[in-house]
Amino acid sequence: MAAFGALAALVASGAATQLDQWAADHAMPLAGASSSPPTALESIVPLLHAPFHPIGVGVAVIVTLPGQVVFSLLLVAVAGWRLWTRGQVEAAVCLTAAWFVAVAVELVFRHTLTRQPLYRHGVHLIGFDSSWPSGHALRCTLVAAALATAWPRLRVPLAIWLAAVVVLLVVGGLHTPTDVVGGLLLATSAVAVAIAVERSGRLRRRAGLWLRRS
């Protein structure tokens, strides 16, 4: 979590602007036209007004679709149900809670942290003003972690998919490198806390106390 906070400070202060501007100039060959940040409705409804031109942006949108708010919650819930039915109740609860807490933290930062303006060909890239951290990078990582826990055999393909998500978010012009790293760091912190709580046995002990009292 310390690394996430440090990166937030760098982005807010403008210390990371040079890196993101370089990426906007040289590392987004598939990017389409500049657009405004998605509305609340566009964030909730899958593929609503999603850009599919040029084709590279369309590919990025499809590959990162499991990181959309509704889809990601459903996938984490499916993984949680699988873990619950296998008797891994603590893992199911902790991973599901991690999704809600991490997404809440993301929303707070998205509405409070504004980076210095980025430009492409002299055009202000408005969508990047409040794009830190990347919600898609965050939620895709949480989905990958939950599914890999529920179905360990999927770990390799999930890792490959997540790597593709990271690359496409940048080259497709959907997020800057610091956006993506911020999302990854927040997700990693959330998963690490979830694992620590699960392994501590606190939930099991508290559930036992509640049952005895009732």
Image: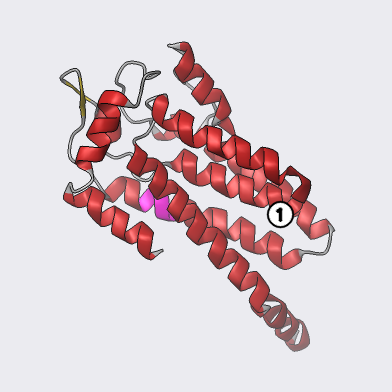
Q: Is residue 159 above or below residue 94?
A: above
Residue 77 image offset from top left, x and y in percent: 68, 49
Residue 15 image offset from top left, x and y in percent: 19, 48
In the picture, the quarter occupied by the N terminus is bottom left
Residue 86 visible here: yes
Q: Nearer the viewer, residue 195 or 47?
A: 195
Magenta span:
104-108
Please report the residue visible at 71 percent of the width from the left and 54 percent of the height from the top.
Answer: 149
Residue picked out by circle 1: 149
Please report the residue visible at 68 percent of the width from the left and 38 percent of the height from the top.
Answer: 157
| Element marked by disc 1 | helix
Q: Quadrant of residue 122?
A: top left
In the image: residue 137, left or right of residue 74: left
Magenta segment, principal secondary structure? helix
Q: Nearer the viewer, residue 74 or 83?
A: 83
In the picture, the quarter occupied by the C terminus is bottom right
In the image: residue 178, left or right of residue 147: left
Would residue 105 be counted in the magenta stretch? yes
In the image: residue 45, left or right of residue 25: right
Would residue 128 be counted in the magenta stretch? no
Q: Nearer the viewer, residue 36 or 119?
A: 119
How many marks overall?
A: 1
Residue 82 image offset from top left, x and y in percent: 79, 52
Q: Quadrant of residue 192?
A: bottom right
Please report the residue visible at 37 percent of the width from the left and 33 percent of the height from the top.
Answer: 175
Q: Quadrant of residue 87?
A: bottom right
Question: Seen from this angle, which residue lies furthest right?
Answer: 86
Indicate the amino acid at tag 1. Answer: Thr
